[in-house]
Image: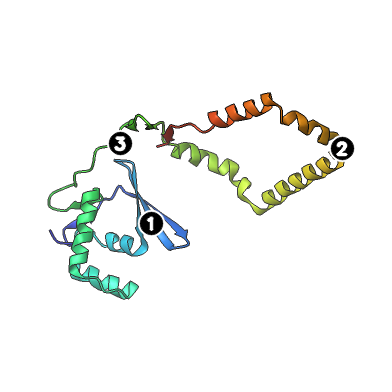
C-alpha cells in the first residue's frame, strides 16, 4: 500500500491544544471513543492523506513547512501506525477494521473501571452557564470574599480560639478519618 491510496477517516473529531511542549492535536475516534494525541507535524502528515496525494508530495510538503527531511521508510511506518489505530482507510479496500468498543466494566478485581456516561453533552450545556467563573473579575470577587473571611476570623479570634480544643477530640478525628476514607474510593469511574 502506498500513501496515495490511504485516506484519513472523515468521522474523526480534532481539537487543538497548546501546551508547554508546543501545539498538540487530540483526535477522538467516535466509533471506539478512544483519544489519540498527535504532535503538530504528525497531524500535518496525516491530514495529507486524502486518497489522492502521492507520497513524494507528502514528503515535499513536510520538508517545506517544518524544514525536516522525512524518509519514505518513516512515512510508511507512520501509515502503518495510522492503520493499526484504525484512523485511516485504504481507498480500494474500504474502511479499516476498527478495534472493538471498550467494555462497560474493565480492569481487575483490585482496580475496576466502569463506563458510566459520556459527559460531553452535559459539559456543552453547562459551559455557557458557568463560563463567568473563569473570568478575572470573578477571581477578584472570590479573593475579596476570602479576605473578608480572614478579617472576620481575626476580629473574632478570641471567640474562635477556645473552640479549637473541640476539634481535637477523638470523635472529631474519627469522623474526619471516615469522611476522608469515603471520599477516596479504590474504584475509578471513566466518564465516557
Instruction: Measuring from the top left, give residue 185's x and y in whole percent.
Output: 48, 31
- Secondary element at image label 2: helix
Q: Position of residue 97 (x, y in %)?
A: 19, 44
Asked whether the beta carbons under mark 1 and mark 2 sit within 8 Å of each other, the answer is no
Between the C-alphas of marks 3 and 1, the distance is: 22 Å
- State the image quarter where residue 165 is shown: top right
Mark closer to the observer (3, 1): 3
Q: Is residue 14 above or below residue 190?
A: below
Residue 127 can be seen in this image? yes
* In the foreground, 134 or 76: 76
Sort mark 1 into few (<14), some (14-19) or many (20+) by Cα contacts within 10 Å: some
From where the camera sits, is residue 53 visible? Answer: no
Residue at 26 percent of width and 62 percent of height: 48
* Location of residue 166 in the rendering, given as x and y in whole percent from the top left corner: 75, 28
- Mark 3–mark 2 CB contact (< 8 Å): no
In space, the residues marked 3 and 2 are separated at their CA atoms by 58 Å
User: What residue is shown with label 1?
Assistant: 25
Check disc 3 and report its element: helix, strand or loop.
loop
Which mark is first along the chain, 2 or 1?
A: 1
Task: Identify the residue shown where x is 30% and y is 75%.
Answer: 64
32 in relation to 82, above or below: above
Q: Is the N terminus in the top left, top right, bottom left or bottom right quadrant?
A: bottom left
- Residue identifier under label 3: 102
> Would you say the residues marked 3 and 1 are in contact, meaning their CB atoms lie under 8 Å apart?
no
The 10 Å Cα crowd at callout 2, few under 14, some 14 to 19, many 20 or more, is few
- Image mark for residue 77: none
| Mark nearer the viewer, 1 or 2 | 2
Amino acid at each position: 500500500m502506498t500513501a496515495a491510496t490511504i485516506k484519513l477517516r472523515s468521522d474523526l473529531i480534532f481539537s487543538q491544544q497548546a501546551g508547554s511542549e508546543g501545539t498538540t492535536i487530540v483526535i477522538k475516534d467516535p466509533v471506539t471513543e478512544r483519544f489519540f494525541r498527535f504532535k503538530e507535524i504528525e497531524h500535518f502528515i496525516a491530514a495529507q492523506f486524502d486518497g489522492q496525494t502521492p507520497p513524494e508530495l507528502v514528503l515535499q510538503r513536510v520538508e517545506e513547512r517544518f524544514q525536516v527531511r522525512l524518509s519514505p521508510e518513516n512515512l510508511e511506518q507512520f501509515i502503518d501506525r495510522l492503520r493499526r489505530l484504525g484512523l485511516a482507510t485504504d481507498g480500494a479496500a474500504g474502511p479499516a477494521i476498527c478495534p472493538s468498543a471498550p467494555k462497560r466494566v474493565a480492569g481487575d478485581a483490585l482496580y475496576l473501571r466502569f463506563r458510566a456516561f459520556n459527559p460531553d453533552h452535559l459539559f456543552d450545556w453547562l459551559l455557557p452557564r458557568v463560563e463567568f467563573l473563569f473570568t478575572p473579575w470573578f477571581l477578584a470577587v472570590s479573593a475579596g470574599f476570602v479576605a473578608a473571611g480572614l478579617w472576620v476570623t481575626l476580629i473574632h479570634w478570641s471567640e474562635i480560639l477556645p473552640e479549637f480544643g473541640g476539634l481535637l477530640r477523638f470523635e472529631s478525628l474519627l469522623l474526619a478519618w471516615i469522611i476522608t476514607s469515603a471520599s477516596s474510593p479504590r474504584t475509578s469511574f471513566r466518564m465516557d
